Image: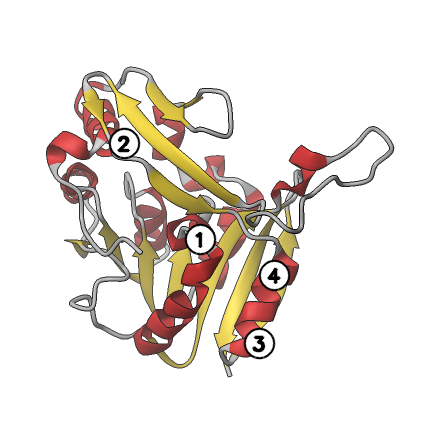
């Protein structure tokens, strides 16, 4: 499991975010994978306001209480929305250019940090993991480490608000059945690499986890998983509460 932060020369998303904030526009943020065709993230969407956010994100921000940790703050859109709601939020990101941009945009408490770094130690009432927030877990094999870490960070009665997607729709047959190789790797484990202009990041693992699997792991590690809301396309918002 990665516990590091990025250097600026390996920070394509941060470079795109910094460019957009500075110039009001950005080039193409390319997303490469050995499992899928090349894709692109429209950088403008990373700067969305509360009114422009999907319903799952709006619901998560509404439910966030107490001292809030915004994991993978990016451009700071969620932290800024929480500040507008007069909520206390601390944002972290492994991207130095994203952290710089968040500071420039007015995020009050922001830190260059990796959630899984042993040096990152504080306590929170709510941990927000949005925009396919389960992704940073990387692989199912990292789930025990993830739950151990959030146990350390949560105050008694605290919870994680996390969104993800069930990629089973990629394996749907014409008759509506799902052709998933249960003997292979978990179907929600994906590898990605991002490229922005001449900045090429390293390949990284990203985890999309279905709610049933998340619920099984949560129960094993002393959490109660609640399905808060489902989106339009196999995506969902879940709440993990420490029992």
The Cα atoms of the two marked residues, 4 and 3, are separated by: 10 Å
* The disc label shown at residue 13, or none: 2
Classed neighbour count for the residue bearing mark 2: other residues with Cα under 10 Å, few (<14), some (14–19), many (≥20): many
Residue shown at the point (36%, 21%) measured from the top left: 30
Q: Quadrant of the N terminus?
A: bottom left
Which one is nearer the viewer's eye here, 119 or 87?
119
Is residue 239 depicted above or below 152 in this figure? above
Expressed as whole percent of the image width and height from the top left, the position of residue 9 reads: 12, 30
For the question of whether residue 92 can be seen, the reply is yes
Tell me how far mark 4 sits from mark 1, CA to CA.
12 Å
Q: In this view, does 90 lie to the left or right of 190?
A: left
What is the tally of numbered marks visible in this picture?
A: 4
Q: Residues within 10 Å of mark 3 (few under 14, many from 20)?
A: some
Q: Quick one: label 1, few (<14), some, or many (20+) residues within 10 Å?
A: many
Of callouts 4 and 3, which one flags the residue occurring earlier in the amino acid sequence? 4
Q: Mark 3 points at which residue?
A: 219
**Side of 150 relative to 172 (left or right):** left
What is the x, y in percent for residue 160? 45, 66
N-terminal of the pair, mark 1 or mark 3, is 1
User: Could you tell me residue 19's position as x and y percent?
Assistant: 20, 23
Q: Which of marks 3 and 2 is in front?
A: 3
On screen, residue 18 above or below 164: above
Which residue carries the number 4 mark? 213
Instruction: Determine which quarter of the picture holds residue 89.
Output: bottom left
N-term mark: 4 or 1? 1
The residue carrying mark 1 is 139
Q: Are marks 2 and 1 in contact (CB under 8 Å)?
A: no
What is the secondary structure assignment of the residue under circle 4?
A: helix
């Amino acid at each position: 499991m990665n516990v590091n932060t990025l250097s600026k020369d390996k920070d394509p998303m941060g470079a795109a975010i910094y460019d957009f904030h500075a110039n009001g526009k950005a080039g193409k943020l390319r997303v490469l994978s050995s499992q899928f065709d090349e894709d692109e993230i429209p950088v403008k969407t990373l700067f969305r306001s509360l009114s422009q956010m999907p319903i799952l994100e709006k619901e998560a921000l509404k439910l966030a209480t107490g001292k809030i940790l915004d994991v993978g703050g990016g451009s700071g859109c969620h932290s800024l929305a929480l500040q507008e709601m007069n909520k206390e939020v601390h944002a972290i990101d492994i991207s130095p250019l994203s952290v710089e941009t968040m500071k420039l945009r007015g995020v009050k408490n922001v830190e260059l940090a990796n959630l899984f770094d042993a040096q990152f130690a504080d306590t929170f009432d709510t941990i927000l993991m949005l925009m396919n927030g389960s992704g940073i877990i990387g692989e199912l094999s990292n789930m025990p480490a993830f739950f151990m870490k959030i146990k350390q960070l949560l105050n008694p009665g605290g919870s994680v608000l996390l969104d993800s997607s069930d990629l089973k729709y990629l394996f749907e047959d014409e008759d509506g059945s799902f052709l998933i190789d249960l003997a292979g790797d978990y179907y929600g484990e994906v590898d990605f690499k991002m490229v922005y202009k001449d900045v090429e990041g390293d390949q990284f693992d990203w985890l999309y986890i279905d709610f049933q699997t998340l619920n099984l792991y949560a129960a094993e590690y002393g959490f109660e998983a609640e399905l808060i809301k489902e989106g339009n396309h196999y995506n969902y918002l879940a709440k993990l509460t420490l029992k």
